[in-house]
Image (cartoon, coloured by chain):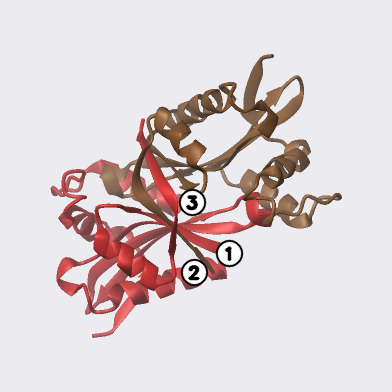
Chain colours: A brown, B red
Amino acid sequence: MTVIFRHATREDLPRIVALIAEDQIGQAREDAATPLNAAYVEAFAAIQRDDNQVLAVAEQNGAVIGCLQITFIPGISRQGMWRGNIETVRVARELRGRGIGRAFFAWAIARCRARGCGLVQLTMDKRRSDAARFYQSLGFTPSHEGMKLSV
Amino acid sequence: MTVIFRHATREDLPRIVALIAEDQIGQAREDAATPLNAAYVEAFAAIQRDDNQVLAVAEQNGAVIGCLQITFIPGISRQGMWRGNIETVRVARELRGRGIGRAFFAWAIARCRARGCGLVQLTMDKRRSDAARFYQSLGFTPSHEGMKLSV
Protein backbone atom coordinates (compact mmCIF):
# COMPACT_ATOMS: atom_id res chain seq x y z
CA MET A 1 0.00 0.00 0.00
CA THR A 2 2.89 2.36 -0.76
CA VAL A 3 1.89 5.94 -1.54
CA ILE A 4 4.06 7.92 -3.95
CA PHE A 5 4.13 11.69 -4.39
CA ARG A 6 4.93 13.22 -7.78
CA HIS A 7 4.25 16.13 -10.11
CA ALA A 8 0.81 15.93 -11.72
CA THR A 9 0.42 15.25 -15.44
CA ARG A 10 -2.39 16.31 -17.76
CA GLU A 11 -3.84 12.79 -17.42
CA ASP A 12 -4.31 13.32 -13.68
CA LEU A 13 -6.41 16.44 -14.15
CA PRO A 14 -9.94 14.93 -14.17
CA ARG A 15 -9.18 13.06 -10.96
CA ILE A 16 -7.72 16.19 -9.34
CA VAL A 17 -10.90 18.12 -10.21
CA ALA A 18 -13.00 15.27 -8.77
CA LEU A 19 -10.99 15.35 -5.51
CA ILE A 20 -11.50 19.10 -5.20
CA ALA A 21 -15.21 18.79 -6.03
CA GLU A 22 -15.94 15.97 -3.55
CA ASP A 23 -15.04 18.27 -0.70
CA GLN A 24 -17.98 19.76 1.20
CA ILE A 25 -16.74 23.32 0.79
CA GLY A 26 -15.47 22.74 -2.74
CA GLN A 27 -18.47 21.06 -4.29
CA ALA A 28 -20.50 24.25 -4.76
CA ARG A 29 -17.56 25.94 -6.46
CA GLU A 30 -16.50 23.28 -8.98
CA ASP A 31 -17.77 21.75 -12.22
CA ALA A 32 -16.98 18.03 -12.16
CA ALA A 33 -18.81 17.31 -15.44
CA THR A 34 -17.14 15.40 -18.27
CA PRO A 35 -15.72 16.30 -20.68
CA LEU A 36 -13.66 18.48 -18.43
CA ASN A 37 -14.50 22.19 -18.30
CA ALA A 38 -11.89 23.93 -20.49
CA ALA A 39 -11.12 26.39 -17.66
CA TYR A 40 -9.40 23.55 -15.77
CA VAL A 41 -7.31 22.62 -18.80
CA GLU A 42 -6.20 26.25 -19.23
CA ALA A 43 -5.35 26.49 -15.54
CA PHE A 44 -3.28 23.32 -15.74
CA ALA A 45 -1.35 24.72 -18.72
CA ALA A 46 -0.69 27.98 -16.83
CA ILE A 47 0.68 26.01 -13.88
CA GLN A 48 2.92 23.96 -16.18
CA ARG A 49 4.33 27.11 -17.82
CA ASP A 50 5.43 28.60 -14.47
CA ASP A 51 8.64 27.22 -12.95
CA ASN A 52 7.53 28.50 -9.55
CA GLN A 53 4.45 26.25 -9.46
CA VAL A 54 4.25 22.57 -8.53
CA LEU A 55 0.93 20.78 -8.82
CA ALA A 56 1.47 17.45 -7.08
CA VAL A 57 -0.50 14.26 -6.58
CA ALA A 58 -0.42 11.35 -4.15
CA GLU A 59 -0.77 8.01 -5.92
CA GLN A 60 -1.55 4.57 -4.52
CA ASN A 61 -1.88 1.43 -6.66
CA GLY A 62 -1.98 3.61 -9.77
CA ALA A 63 -4.85 5.76 -8.48
CA VAL A 64 -4.59 9.45 -7.63
CA ILE A 65 -5.76 9.81 -4.02
CA GLY A 66 -4.59 13.32 -3.14
CA CYS A 67 -3.38 16.63 -4.51
CA LEU A 68 -1.80 19.89 -3.46
CA GLN A 69 -0.19 22.89 -5.12
CA ILE A 70 3.01 24.68 -4.09
CA THR A 71 3.88 28.19 -5.26
CA PHE A 72 7.48 29.27 -4.66
CA ILE A 73 7.39 33.04 -3.95
CA PRO A 74 10.55 35.16 -3.99
CA GLY A 75 10.24 38.15 -1.67
CA ILE A 76 12.18 41.07 -0.21
CA SER A 77 11.10 40.73 3.41
CA ARG A 78 12.90 38.56 5.98
CA GLN A 79 16.19 39.27 4.20
CA GLY A 80 15.06 38.18 0.77
CA MET A 81 13.52 34.94 1.93
CA TRP A 82 11.64 32.65 -0.46
CA ARG A 83 8.40 31.19 0.83
CA GLY A 84 6.44 28.15 -0.23
CA ASN A 85 2.71 28.83 -0.45
CA ILE A 86 0.52 25.72 -0.36
CA GLU A 87 -3.03 25.65 -1.77
CA THR A 88 -5.74 23.16 -2.61
CA VAL A 89 -4.75 20.30 -0.33
CA ARG A 90 -6.99 17.25 -0.65
CA VAL A 91 -6.82 13.58 0.35
CA ALA A 92 -9.60 11.23 -0.77
CA ARG A 93 -12.24 11.16 1.96
CA GLU A 94 -12.20 7.36 2.40
CA LEU A 95 -8.41 7.35 2.96
CA ARG A 96 -8.13 10.01 5.64
CA GLY A 97 -6.66 9.28 9.06
CA ARG A 98 -3.96 7.00 7.68
CA GLY A 99 -1.07 9.44 7.65
CA ILE A 100 -1.21 10.15 3.92
CA GLY A 101 -1.64 13.89 4.42
CA ARG A 102 1.23 13.92 6.89
CA ALA A 103 3.55 12.11 4.46
CA PHE A 104 2.39 14.34 1.59
CA PHE A 105 3.27 17.44 3.64
CA ALA A 106 6.68 16.03 4.54
CA TRP A 107 7.28 15.63 0.79
CA ALA A 108 5.98 19.14 0.02
CA ILE A 109 8.03 20.77 2.79
CA ALA A 110 11.14 18.99 1.49
CA ARG A 111 10.40 20.45 -1.99
CA CYS A 112 10.17 23.92 -0.39
CA ARG A 113 13.49 23.45 1.42
CA ALA A 114 15.12 22.21 -1.79
CA ARG A 115 14.01 25.45 -3.47
CA GLY A 116 15.54 27.54 -0.70
CA CYS A 117 12.36 28.51 1.13
CA GLY A 118 12.67 29.56 4.76
CA LEU A 119 8.92 29.61 5.38
CA VAL A 120 5.99 27.46 4.31
CA GLN A 121 2.56 29.05 4.51
CA LEU A 122 -1.04 28.20 3.78
CA THR A 123 -4.48 29.47 4.60
CA MET A 124 -7.14 27.18 5.95
CA ASP A 125 -10.88 27.82 5.85
CA LYS A 126 -11.90 28.36 9.49
CA ARG A 127 -14.78 25.91 8.99
CA ARG A 128 -12.20 23.06 8.75
CA SER A 129 -11.62 22.51 12.47
CA ASP A 130 -10.05 19.06 11.94
CA ALA A 131 -7.55 20.59 9.54
CA ALA A 132 -6.45 23.13 12.18
CA ARG A 133 -5.42 20.29 14.49
CA PHE A 134 -3.66 18.53 11.61
CA TYR A 135 -1.61 21.57 10.59
CA GLN A 136 -0.69 22.43 14.16
CA SER A 137 0.51 18.86 14.66
CA LEU A 138 2.85 19.47 11.70
CA GLY A 139 4.26 22.54 13.46
CA PHE A 140 2.29 25.24 11.66
CA THR A 141 1.33 28.25 13.80
CA PRO A 142 -2.02 30.04 13.23
CA SER A 143 -0.30 33.40 13.64
CA HIS A 144 -2.09 35.18 10.81
CA GLU A 145 -5.57 36.06 9.63
CA GLY A 146 -6.24 34.74 6.12
CA MET A 147 -8.11 37.54 4.35
CA LYS A 148 -9.96 36.91 1.07
CA LEU A 149 -11.72 39.26 -1.32
CA SER A 150 -13.67 38.18 -4.39
CA VAL A 151 -13.00 40.65 -7.20
CA MET B 1 0.63 65.80 -3.05
CA THR B 2 -0.31 63.28 -5.72
CA VAL B 3 0.71 59.69 -4.99
CA ILE B 4 1.58 57.43 -7.90
CA PHE B 5 1.78 53.65 -7.88
CA ARG B 6 4.22 51.82 -10.15
CA HIS B 7 6.45 48.77 -10.52
CA ALA B 8 9.58 49.00 -8.38
CA THR B 9 13.01 49.41 -9.95
CA ARG B 10 16.39 48.31 -8.64
CA GLU B 11 17.00 51.90 -7.49
CA ASP B 12 13.98 51.68 -5.15
CA LEU B 13 15.31 48.63 -3.34
CA PRO B 14 17.19 50.30 -0.43
CA ARG B 15 14.11 52.39 0.39
CA ILE B 16 11.84 49.31 0.18
CA VAL B 17 14.10 47.48 2.64
CA ALA B 18 14.05 50.52 4.95
CA LEU B 19 10.23 50.59 4.85
CA ILE B 20 10.05 46.91 5.74
CA ALA B 21 12.66 47.33 8.48
CA GLU B 22 11.03 50.36 10.13
CA ASP B 23 8.01 48.24 10.99
CA GLN B 24 7.80 47.04 14.59
CA ILE B 25 7.37 43.40 13.58
CA GLY B 26 9.78 43.65 10.66
CA GLN B 27 12.71 45.35 12.36
CA ALA B 28 14.00 42.22 14.12
CA ARG B 29 13.93 40.28 10.86
CA GLU B 30 15.66 42.68 8.48
CA ASP B 31 19.15 44.00 7.82
CA ALA B 32 18.86 47.68 6.90
CA ALA B 33 22.64 48.22 6.76
CA THR B 34 24.31 49.86 3.76
CA PRO B 35 25.64 48.72 1.39
CA LEU B 36 22.55 46.60 0.92
CA ASN B 37 22.73 42.95 1.99
CA ALA B 38 23.21 40.93 -1.22
CA ALA B 39 20.28 38.68 -0.27
CA TYR B 40 17.91 41.57 -1.02
CA VAL B 41 19.50 42.16 -4.41
CA GLU B 42 19.15 38.49 -5.30
CA ALA B 43 15.53 38.47 -4.17
CA PHE B 44 14.79 41.53 -6.30
CA ALA B 45 16.32 39.81 -9.34
CA ALA B 46 14.22 36.68 -8.71
CA ILE B 47 11.06 38.81 -8.57
CA GLN B 48 12.01 40.58 -11.81
CA ARG B 49 12.57 37.24 -13.60
CA ASP B 50 9.07 35.96 -12.75
CA ASP B 51 6.20 37.32 -14.87
CA ASN B 52 3.77 36.35 -12.10
CA GLN B 53 5.35 38.74 -9.57
CA VAL B 54 4.81 42.49 -9.22
CA LEU B 55 6.82 44.39 -6.65
CA ALA B 56 5.18 47.81 -6.50
CA VAL B 57 5.88 51.12 -4.79
CA ALA B 58 3.88 54.21 -3.89
CA GLU B 59 5.73 57.42 -4.72
CA GLN B 60 5.08 60.99 -3.63
CA ASN B 61 7.22 63.98 -4.64
CA GLY B 62 9.86 61.58 -5.94
CA ALA B 63 10.10 59.65 -2.65
CA VAL B 64 9.08 56.00 -2.17
CA ILE B 65 6.55 55.99 0.66
CA GLY B 66 5.03 52.52 0.38
CA CYS B 67 5.45 49.05 -1.10
CA LEU B 68 3.60 45.81 -1.69
CA GLN B 69 4.11 42.63 -3.68
CA ILE B 70 1.52 40.80 -5.76
CA THR B 71 1.94 37.16 -6.84
CA PHE B 72 -0.45 35.97 -9.54
CA ILE B 73 -1.18 32.29 -8.83
CA PRO B 74 -2.84 30.02 -11.40
CA GLY B 75 -4.82 27.23 -9.74
CA ILE B 76 -7.18 24.37 -10.47
CA SER B 77 -9.76 25.03 -7.75
CA ARG B 78 -12.77 27.35 -8.19
CA GLN B 79 -12.94 26.34 -11.85
CA GLY B 80 -9.36 27.19 -12.69
CA MET B 81 -9.42 30.56 -11.02
CA TRP B 82 -6.32 32.74 -10.78
CA ARG B 83 -5.72 34.43 -7.46
CA GLY B 84 -3.69 37.48 -6.51
CA ASN B 85 -1.65 36.95 -3.36
CA ILE B 86 -0.47 40.15 -1.67
CA GLU B 87 2.53 40.27 0.67
CA THR B 88 4.73 42.82 2.41
CA VAL B 89 2.38 45.80 2.48
CA ARG B 90 3.93 48.90 4.00
CA VAL B 91 3.14 52.63 4.07
CA ALA B 92 5.61 55.00 5.71
CA ARG B 93 4.60 55.42 9.35
CA GLU B 94 4.36 59.21 9.24
CA LEU B 95 1.97 59.11 6.26
CA ARG B 96 -0.60 56.64 7.57
CA GLY B 97 -4.25 57.57 7.97
CA ARG B 98 -4.33 59.63 4.77
CA GLY B 99 -5.88 57.06 2.45
CA ILE B 100 -2.62 56.07 0.75
CA GLY B 101 -3.01 52.39 1.67
CA ARG B 102 -6.59 52.43 0.43
CA ALA B 103 -5.58 53.94 -2.92
CA PHE B 104 -2.61 51.55 -3.19
CA PHE B 105 -4.95 48.58 -2.68
CA ALA B 106 -7.40 49.90 -5.27
CA TRP B 107 -4.45 49.98 -7.70
CA ALA B 108 -3.28 46.48 -6.69
CA ILE B 109 -6.77 44.98 -6.95
CA ALA B 110 -7.14 46.52 -10.42
CA ARG B 111 -3.84 44.84 -11.42
CA CYS B 112 -5.24 41.51 -10.15
CA ARG B 113 -8.47 41.96 -12.13
CA ALA B 114 -6.47 42.87 -15.25
CA ARG B 115 -4.61 39.57 -14.88
CA GLY B 116 -7.86 37.64 -14.65
CA CYS B 117 -7.86 36.96 -10.91
CA GLY B 118 -11.19 36.16 -9.26
CA LEU B 119 -9.85 36.35 -5.73
CA VAL B 120 -7.35 38.53 -3.91
CA GLN B 121 -5.85 37.12 -0.73
CA LEU B 122 -3.36 38.07 1.92
CA THR B 123 -2.40 37.01 5.40
CA MET B 124 -2.10 39.52 8.19
CA ASP B 125 -0.16 39.06 11.41
CA LYS B 126 -2.82 38.84 14.15
CA ARG B 127 -0.80 41.36 16.18
CA ARG B 128 -1.77 44.05 13.63
CA SER B 129 -5.26 44.88 14.95
CA ASP B 130 -5.43 48.20 13.08
CA ALA B 131 -4.70 46.38 9.83
CA ALA B 132 -7.64 44.02 10.40
CA ARG B 133 -10.04 46.97 10.45
CA PHE B 134 -8.37 48.42 7.36
CA TYR B 135 -8.66 45.21 5.31
CA GLN B 136 -12.24 44.60 6.39
CA SER B 137 -13.12 48.14 5.32
CA LEU B 138 -11.78 47.21 1.87
CA GLY B 139 -14.15 44.21 1.77
CA PHE B 140 -11.70 41.47 2.79
CA THR B 141 -13.20 38.68 4.91
CA PRO B 142 -11.09 37.02 7.64
CA SER B 143 -12.47 33.61 6.64
CA HIS B 144 -9.20 31.69 6.90
CA GLU B 145 -6.46 30.91 9.38
CA GLY B 146 -3.06 31.96 8.10
CA MET B 147 -0.71 29.13 9.04
CA LYS B 148 3.09 29.57 8.94
CA LEU B 149 5.93 27.11 9.43
CA SER B 150 9.61 28.04 9.49
CA VAL B 151 11.58 25.34 7.70
| Foreground of the two, B145 or B97 | B145
- Which is in the foreground here, disc 3 or disc 1? 1
In depth, the one of B110 and B57 nearer the eye is B110
- Relative placement, left or right, of B108 versus B41 is right
Residues packed near mark 2 inside 10 Å, few (<14), some (14 to 19) or many (20 plus): some
Residue B50, numbered circle: 3
Q: CA distance from mark 1 to mark 2?
A: 12 Å
Look at label 1 and name its amino acid.
Gly
In the image, are marks 1 and 2 on the same chain? Answer: yes
Write down the chain letter for disc 2: B
Q: Secondary structure at mark 1?
A: strand
Query: Marks 3 and 2, Cα distance to the nearest angstrom?
Result: 16 Å
Figure check: A90 above or below A110: below
**Residue B42 position within the rendered picture, expressed as x and y whole percent measured from the top left:** 33, 44
Residue A82 x/y as whole percent: 38, 41
Q: Residues within 10 Å of mark 1 (few under 14, many from 20)?
A: some
User: Whole-percent x and y of residue B128?
Assistant: 25, 57
Q: Measuring from the top left, give residue A2's x and y in whole percent.
A: 66, 15
The residue labelled by disc 2 is: B111
Mark sitting earlier along the chain (3/2): 3
Q: Which residue does the numbered mark 1 point to in the structure image?
A: B118
Residue A125 as seen in the image, left or right of residue A119: right
